[in-house]
Image: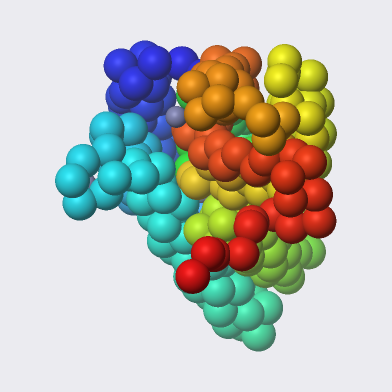
Amino acid sequence: MVSASERIRVVNRVTVVSAGTNCILAIGKILVGLLGRSSALVADGVHSVSDIGTTLIAFVGIRMSTKESDEDHPYGHEKIEAALTKIVATLLFITAVYICIQSYHGVRTPADTPPDAITLWVALISLGMKELLFRYTMRGAKKIQSNAMRADAWHNRSDALSSLASFIGILGARFGVGVLDPIMGMAIGVYLAKLAIQIYIESFQELIDTAADKSVVRRIRGYIATTEGVGGIDSLKTRRHGNRIFVDVEISVDGTLSLFEAHHIAAEVHQGIEEVFQEVKHCMVHVNPREVHPREEHPPPVS
Ligand SMILES: [Zn+2]
Ligand SMILES: [Zn+2]
Ligand SMILES: [Zn+2]
């Protein structure tokens, strides 16, 4: 885990580079696409405009989720990123449907004049720039462990592929296979729609308290079990909270220990987990007395 200030620094940098690149691409593609008569290139350009919006939403989400917890949100703001990632995914889906509809009209009435050669070059340049942007954004996403930025990065990779598709489509149109251009456009649309649904489901899972990865849970369990004084783990629950994890554990300790001693063991588990597993935001420890109530997690209330 990187510090909050480092996180903000990375997201600022990636956002400026990403929005700037997409701005150049959007203007270039729409202009050349219109002048050079390529429906695939115009669709790609419109998509680049939506890319700027996507990056900005991811930016806002990451910035807001980095805020310290406050009175209104005592558990922190991490889920804001997941909630906004759903909007990013929805926008991507709408874009995908739009591209499909546009291309469908193109299949029914293919243009008689093939696209100009310059449209080929634009598609090729776009392919290269988007691939570089993918790698750049992905590096940032890994560094700050952000799903919103990761989604945005994959979006760039899919855009690189869609530029490749436009390239093939335009090439086909120039060699007399005019219908190839809109068909490639439709393929791009379907691909993007699938990606959008995937990202949506992922952020949805972060919002419904899905458990942490099995390997992480296993390591957490191992750490707690080997903490001195812990006699057993009665229950261990984890839930994702944006890119962080909350842990709730019930440990059993020797029932004859004093409250001071039992608390010391619980504190060791609490602090140890949060130190070793940086992604854990908080580890709540509940202590059960062993031997005294061996069959129950909680003793029945005394009336
Ligand atoms: Zn895009
Ligand atoms: Zn708040
Ligand atoms: Zn804590």
Q: Residue furthest bottom?
A: 108
Q: Quadrant of residue 50?
A: bottom left
Residue drawn at point x = 69 percent, y = 64 percent: 194
> Would residue 125 be seen by someone viewing this image from the given angle?
no
Residue drawn at point x = 37 percent, y = 26 percent: 11
Residue drawn at point x = 50 percent, y = 46 percent: 241
Q: Quadrant of ligand 3?
A: top left
| 256, above or below 48, in the image | above
The foreground one among 91 and 38 is 91
User: Number of labelled discs?
Assistant: 0
Residue drawn at point x = 57 percent, y = 57 percent: 209
List x then y, in percent, for residue 153: 56, 36
The foreground one among 105 and 149 is 149
**Left or right of 47 in this view: 234:** right
**Left or right of 174 in this view: 242:** left
Q: Quadrant of residue 277?
A: top right
The foreground one among 101 and 147 is 147
Q: Residue furthest left?
A: 71
Q: Residue furthest front?
A: 303
The foreground one among 263 and 189 is 263
List x then y, in percent, for residue 239: 59, 49
Display coloring: rainbow
> Would residue 303 be seen by someone viewing this image from the given angle?
yes
List x then y, in percent, for residue 182: 66, 68
**Left or right of 223 in this view: 30:** left
**Left or right of 239 in this view: 148:** left
Q: Quadrant of residue 69?
A: top left
